[in-house]
Amino acid sequence: MTRSPAERAREAFAQLFGGRPTLLARAPGRVNLIGEFTDYNEGYCLPVAIDRETVVAARPRRDGIVHVVAADDKNREDRFSLDAPLVPLSNGHWGNYVRGVFAALRRQGHLPGGAEMVIAGNVPQGAGLSSSAALEVAVGQALKSMFRLEVDATGLALAGQRAEHEFAGCQCGIMDQLVSAHGRTGHAVLLDCRTLATTPVPMPEGTAIVVVESGIQRGLVDSEYNLRRHQCEQAAAHFGVRTLRDLSSERFNAERGTLDTKAAQRARHVIGENERTLAAVQALRDGDLAGMGVLMRAAHVSLRDDFEVSLPAIDELVDLLNSAVGSAGGARLTGGGFGGCVVALLPAAMTAQLRSAVMRGYRTPQGTAPVIHVCSASDGAGVLA
Ligand code: GLA
């Protein structure tokens, strides 16, 4: 049996630092059901915190030194002093998420001290399930609990997002960190990315959340993510609104003629996606998986044609899943796009059928069978007993 992240973190901690950690903090990865690229437009999204998590085993130090070890990266380490200004490491280094959270918490006025930390997790990396948000929020949670910082779940999420902006170079929205901090077992979470309000929405009984890894590695920083964000801001500025959240479809349709074509496509996606997300909340509440499926398919078409963040191989995988699920549910590309994962919602009884359809019909670019995760909606960040 594979050992859990908590067991691995505890064991590596004893080996490397000696003795026991003061605490183990955890935070989950996420899969977004609908509401894509709406977060940085102050709109709505509807993600689920999944039962794949990052665990941080931690113990305070008195000398202001932070010593972090990544158990999943051959025990590679990062070490820095809180007495010197915090600076990012080279691009793509996992240590940036840790450093970034320390820096962000300090900017929020908190004073985390030095620490020994071991990180271990089972959120697939680079697959679009927010392993980085899980790491940021788990580190934040460990620091909050160890140093009794007066920061709430939303504050931890904001610190994680700031780490992305200032240390990892990705201008991401708040979705991943917010749901990693606020997830709820058995629920999706409606996020209002303007007010940062989070509302748990029960998953209908007997629904399976199936995530298929396309095997196409993605990197937000390297992708066109920041460019899309810029185009959305351009569109908002053109209409003289604060963000696309403030643009109605009526006004957009009436006045879009004067807007640059690409910016207009991006805006149309965001406006439609906000509407679909609110409709999806209702569909879940009504236990209407078929209705949810219709919305997910429409969301995929919009991501493919208007936001242009899909790839031909991803479209094929989505089509395959949608044919296997039929009108009983639906599937779409999820997360930041250009690879990563596809998510399907379906009656749990159809999971085996879906799995064999995928195994028969899809191969990753490396020619291997794709990894399939059947996920359940889990709680957000916390401390393990
Ligand atoms: C990534 C970002 C999120 C969000 C999604 C797209 O996951 O980190 O903030 O913008 O892409 O919905």
Image (cartoon, helix red, strand yellow):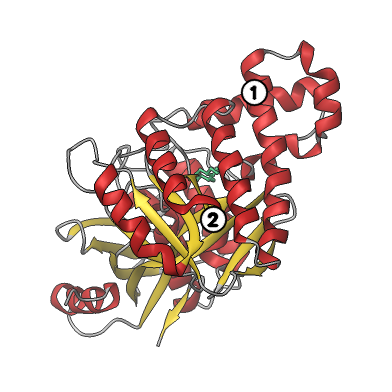
Element carrying mark 1: helix
Could you tell me residue 310's position as x and y percent? Answer: 45, 32
Q: Nearer the viewer, residue 22 or 345?
A: 345
User: In the picture shown, does residue 293 fall above or below 300?
Assistant: below
Which residue lies at the image location 50% right of the left edge and 42% below the top edge? 165
Screen quadrant of the N terminus: bottom left
Q: CA distance from mark 1 to mark 2?
A: 27 Å
Q: Amino acid at mark 1?
A: Gln
Where residue 185 sits in the image (x, y, percent)?
A: 53, 75
Q: Residue at x 29, y 55 (%)?
A: 356
Left or right, 152 with reference to 86: right
First along the sequence among labels 1 and 2: 1
Secondary element under disc 2, as helix, strand or loop, is loop
- Neighbour class for label 1 at 10 Å: few (<14), some, many (≥20)? many
Residue at 54 percent across and 38 percent down: it is 300
Give the residue pinned by disc 2: 329
| Residues marked 1 and 2 touching at CB (< 8 Å) | no
Q: Which of 37 and 305 lies nearest the eye of the viewer?
A: 305
Q: Position of residue 118 (x, y in %)?
A: 27, 68
Q: Which mark is residue 265?
A: 1
On the rendered structure, is 283 left or right of 374? right
Residue 75 as seen in the image, left or right of residue 287:
left
Residue type at mark 2 is Gly
- Is the residue 332 above or below the residue 329 in the image? above
- Regarding residue 367, the answer to whether it shows in the image is yes
